[in-house]
Amino acid sequence: MMNGFGYLVMLGWIPMVLFLFSKLPIQRALIISFLVAWLFLPMGEIELSGIPNYTKMSATCYGVLLATFIFDFQRFRQFRLHWIDSPMIVWCLCPGLSSLANGLGPYDALSAILTQAVTWGLPYFLGRLYLGNLKGLQQLAIAIVWGGLVYIPLCLIEIRLSPQLHMWLYGFYPQSFDQAFRYGGFRPIIFMQHGLMVGTWMMTATLIAFWLWRIGSLQPLLRQFAEGTPPKLTVPREGLWGTSLAVFLGLLITFVLVKATGAYFLLVVGIAVVLGMRWWQTSLPLLLVVLVTCGYLSFNAVGGLTPQVITQISTVATRFTNADRAGSLAFRLTNEAQLSAKARQQPIFGWAGWGRSRIYDELGKDISVTDSLWIITFGTFGAVGLVSWMAAMLAPVLGFVLLRYPASTWLHPQVLPAAVLAIGLVLYVMDCMVNGMVNPIYTLIAGGLAGLVERPAVRPSPKEKLPDIFPLYVNSEDGKSSLY
């Protein structure tokens, strides 16, 4: 049960968001509000009658939405729907359609739509509204790196002492303590839902830091975000190398110590994708990952996970990890195969909420284990929900790559942060094939990329020679790059 300090933090967060918006530029205030809330607010909730419970997700979304209405209402009048927004609209309406299709009534349908809109729609909409440009996504990318840096000492504390920070501050554990012990040591949870979510977060921060370090852009961007002013371009790229390398290595070492095996694989895939796109100047590596992800989910949704297939996958996994991890994977896949079979009994709109998509024994005991977001989505909202969620997450990435900024532009310093965020979003979708944790930062990314798709691209020439210092604020009278 959450203690008094937890309730104080939760209830005081909306006034804090309003304060941030009153003191900072709106784009920066929005990013900081989402980032700080997700990294530090408790994983608790306050029950409310008639509307969805008050959680760290709703606290942030309600606060930011209220602040934007107060401080920047004109921006809402400029918003126009675009075809890229269609999947997210369907995804937000899908819970209501599922409730009605299962006879749960209009009240349940409206409540389900509101919950979905707060969890997914508002972060996407706010990202679309304020981060749909190269500068906005650049600031978000650097904020994620800063978030990873802030988590380094907290991760090290919990690796040494066990996951205790959430208990010390808020009075309860966000998950079963048994799952915090891995490979002879502790896996940190900090203030997130699970240690696996921490692993995915540190993976994304490490991936961004790696590629910004490689082009010599990490240190000046970190300084720019911290100071809120353009960096002084007096330090040659060579002078920034050591500090930028230290930032990347600090994130990488901490990420390895977090002990999230699946996130290790995701980081390798992310680095391989960017290397392939850099060497061959083509988007095929990223498109291949998207195709494999969609193919895997389609294969499982139609019943392709037979016992024989699961055994083969487990055998292959044993060669790369160990028997314990391979057995855990086989257990997950077996449950997914059973849940997928039940989901296919209501294939269009699923079984709706209240645990109706789960499996129960003859005594009514719930015997199913739902680890993956995709199977939760498929069972609860059917094929309509699964397809709309996948499209809401991946259509902005495909539009960014195929319609606006092809791989030939990705090495340009202004484009690279958005490009790496696109890869991070795809890796998050891959993670949802085996884990079921919602993170609004990735929904913000999807909204920002959708905003880029909505407007014409300003493409830098792939043959443009970059100067020896980071060229973020050059070649214009007001000191800002015309790429924005």
Image (cartoon, rainbow, N blue to C red):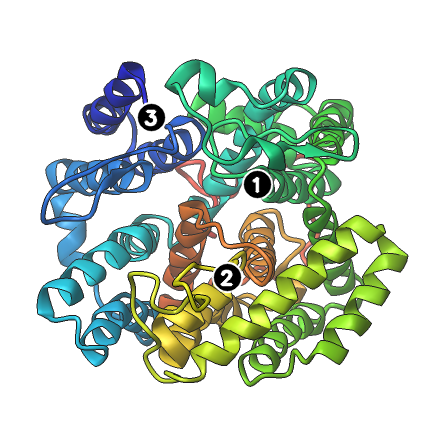
State which tag comes first along the sequence, 1 or 2.
Answer: 1
Circles 3 and 1 in contact, beta carbons < 8 Å: no
Instruction: Give the quadrant of residue 315.
Output: bottom right
State the SS at label 2: loop
Say whether residue 309 is left or right of residue 200.
right
The residue under the point 70% across, 59% down is 329
The residue under the point 27% across, 52% down is 122
State the SS at label 1: helix
Circles 3 and 2 in contact, beta carbons < 8 Å: no
Depth check, front residue: 431 or 111: 111
- Which residue reaches farthest front? 363
Depth check, front residue: 84 or 335: 335
Tag of residue 368: 2
* Residue holding disc 3: 1
Q: CA distance from mark 3 to mark 1?
A: 26 Å
State which tag comes first along the sequence, 3 or 1.
Answer: 3
Q: CA distance from mark 1 to mark 2?
A: 27 Å
State the SS at label 3: loop
Q: Is residue 290 visible?
A: yes
Q: What amino acid type is highlighted by mark number 2?
A: Ser
* Residue holding disc 1: 201
Q: Is residue 232 visible?
A: no
> Dot 2: within a 10 Å radius of its alpha carbon, few (fewer than 14), some, or many (20 or more) residues?
some
Q: What amino acid type is highlighted by mark number 3?
A: Met
